[in-house]
Image (cartoon, rainbow, N blue to C red):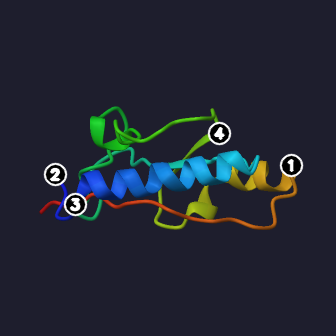
C-alpha cells in the first residue's frame, strides 16, 4: 500500500502521540476524505478503507476531523475547535498514502 516503511512510520507517529499525551496535550486526528474520485486521487473516498485512520494508529481521543483538501485548516470543524480551545500551537505528524 505504501512506498515506505509503514511499520516504522506508524511506530514513530504512535511514539509522538504517547509523548504529547504524557504532557497532557490534546491529540487531534485529521482524515483526508473526498466525496468522490477527484484529480486522480482514489485512496480517500468517503466510506472506503482509505478514508479511515490507519489501523495501526493509536487513537486516544475523539478529536477526529475531516478535511477534503490538502490544507487541514480548510476543515471548518477543525478551525472551530482551534478557536474554542484557543489553540495557538500545533505539532503535525502524519503520512500520505501513495499508489506505489
Q: CA distance from mark 2 to mark 4?
A: 26 Å
Q: Looking at the figure, which quarter contains the C terminus? A: bottom left
Mark seen at residue 60: none
Is 80 positioned to the left or the right of 51 in the image? right
CA gap, disc 2 and disc 1: 37 Å
Q: Tag 4's secondary structure?
A: loop
Question: Earlier along the polypeptide chain: callout 4 or callout 3?
Answer: 3
| Crowd band around label 3 with a 10 angstrom C-alpha radius: few (<14), some (14–19), many (20+) | few
Q: CA distance from mark 1 to mark 4?
A: 13 Å
- Comparing 22 with 48, the one in front is 22
Give the number of the disc on residue 1.
2
Looking at the image, residue 17 lies above or below residue 74: above
Mark seen at residue 5:
3
Mark 4 vs mark 3, CA separation in Å: 27 Å
Labelled pair 2, 1 in contact (Cβ < 8 Å)? no
Residue 34 place in picture, x, y as percent: 39, 49
- Under circle 3, the secondary element is loop
Q: Which residue bears the numbered disc 4? A: 63
Residue 9: x and y in percent read 34, 58
Sequence-wise first label, 3 or 1: 3
Q: Give the Cα separation between the discs numbered 3 and 1.
A: 37 Å
Q: 18 or 85: nearer the eye? A: 18
Q: Helix or strand or loop: what does disc 1 sit on?
A: helix
Question: Which of the 4 quarters of the picture holds residue 96?
Answer: bottom left
Q: Is residue 44 visible?
A: yes
Q: Residue at x 26, y 50 (%)?
A: 43
Residue 13 percent coordinates (x, y): 45, 55
Amino acid at each position: 500500500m505504501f512506498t515506505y516503511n509503514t511499520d516504522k512510520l506508524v511506530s514513530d507517529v504512535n511514539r509522538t502521540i504517547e509523548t504529547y499525551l504524557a504532557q497532557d496535550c490534546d491529540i487531534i486526528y485529521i482524515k483526508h476524505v473526498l466525496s468522490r474520485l477527484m484529480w486522480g486521487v482514489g485512496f480517500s473516498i468517503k466510506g472506503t478503507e482509505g478514508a479511515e485512520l490507519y489501523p495501526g494508529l493509536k487513537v486516544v481521543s475523539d478529536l477526529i476531523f475531516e478535511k477534503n483538501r490538502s490544507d487541514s485548516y480548510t476543515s471548518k470543524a477543525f478551525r472551530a475547535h482551534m478557536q474554542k480551545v484557543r489553540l495557538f500551537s500545533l505539532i503535525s505528524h502524519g503520512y500520505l498514502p501513495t499508489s506505489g
